[in-house]
Image: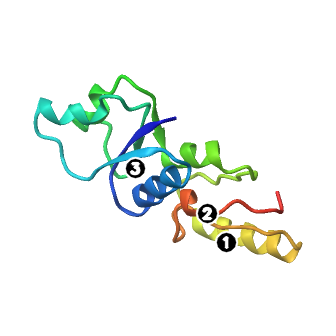
Amino acid sequence: MRRAVVLGMARSGQAAAALLERNGVEVVRVDRRLTNDQDVSVLEGADVLIKSPGVPRSNPLVKTARIPIWSEVELAAHYLPNPILGVTGTNGKTTTVEWLGAMFRSAGRDVAVAGNVGRAIAGVEASSDA
């Protein structure tokens, strides 16, 4: 990957941009509502669009993209060599994630808890304890 557009520059977008840059990828940051067709020109030459979770699918940039659209989690999965355990659902995710982190730590594993619990997964450094 040579060039990526990161749409949404809150916590996950900032972490995604930093991860890409650490890996030599040119990053175009976009953090505003696109209002006209000229704005889609930021996609020119990009290999991928990284969409932050808070950006709706109805965003004009997302709707017009003809390149792969990845979440910040998918981006991290491409770069982190460590296993990733995901927790989804409606209620209890934060508690479940924190419990899992505590269990892995008590078993002597080097674990990072990330996502909606404080830090974006793209901000996690690779561990030697995969």
Vertical arrangement, residue 112 with respect to residue 25, above or below: below
Secondary element at image label 2: loop
Which of the two residues, 8 or 93, is positioned nearer the viewer here? 8
Where does the image place residue 123, in percent across and percent down from the top left?
Answer: 55, 62
Q: Name the residue under label 1.
A: 98
Q: In this view, does 68 lie to the left or right of 56?
A: right
Where does the image place residue 60, in percent across and percent down from the top left?
Answer: 22, 34
Amino acid found under the numbered disc labelled 1: Glu
Cα–Cα span, label 1 and label 3: 23 Å
Q: How is this picture coloured? A: rainbow
Which is closer to the viewer, label 2 or label 1? 2
Amino acid found under the numbered disc labelled 3: Ser
Rendered image: mark on residue 126: none
Which is closer to the viewer, label 3 or label 2? 2
Secondary element at image label 1: helix
Q: Mark 2 points at which residue?
A: 124
Where does the image place residue 76, in percent across and percent down from the top left?
Answer: 59, 49
Image point (42%, 44%), residue name? 26
Where does the image place residue 32, in percent across and percent down from the top left?
Answer: 20, 51
Image point (39%, 44%), residue name? 51
Q: How crowded is mark 3: few (under 14 residues within 10 Å), some or many (20 or more)?
A: many
Q: Name the residue under label 3.
A: 52
Secondary element at image label 3: loop
Cα–Cα span, label 3 and label 2: 16 Å
Seen as rendered, the residue at the extreme front is 24
Image point (54%, 55%), residue name? 22
Which is closer to the viewer, label 1 or label 3? 3
Image point (47%, 59%), residue name? 15
The quadrant of the picture occupied by the C terminus is bottom right
Cα–Cα span, label 2 and label 1: 16 Å
Q: Residues within 10 Å of mark 2 (few under 14, many from 20)?
A: some
Vertical arrangement, residue 46 with respect to residue 17, above or below: above
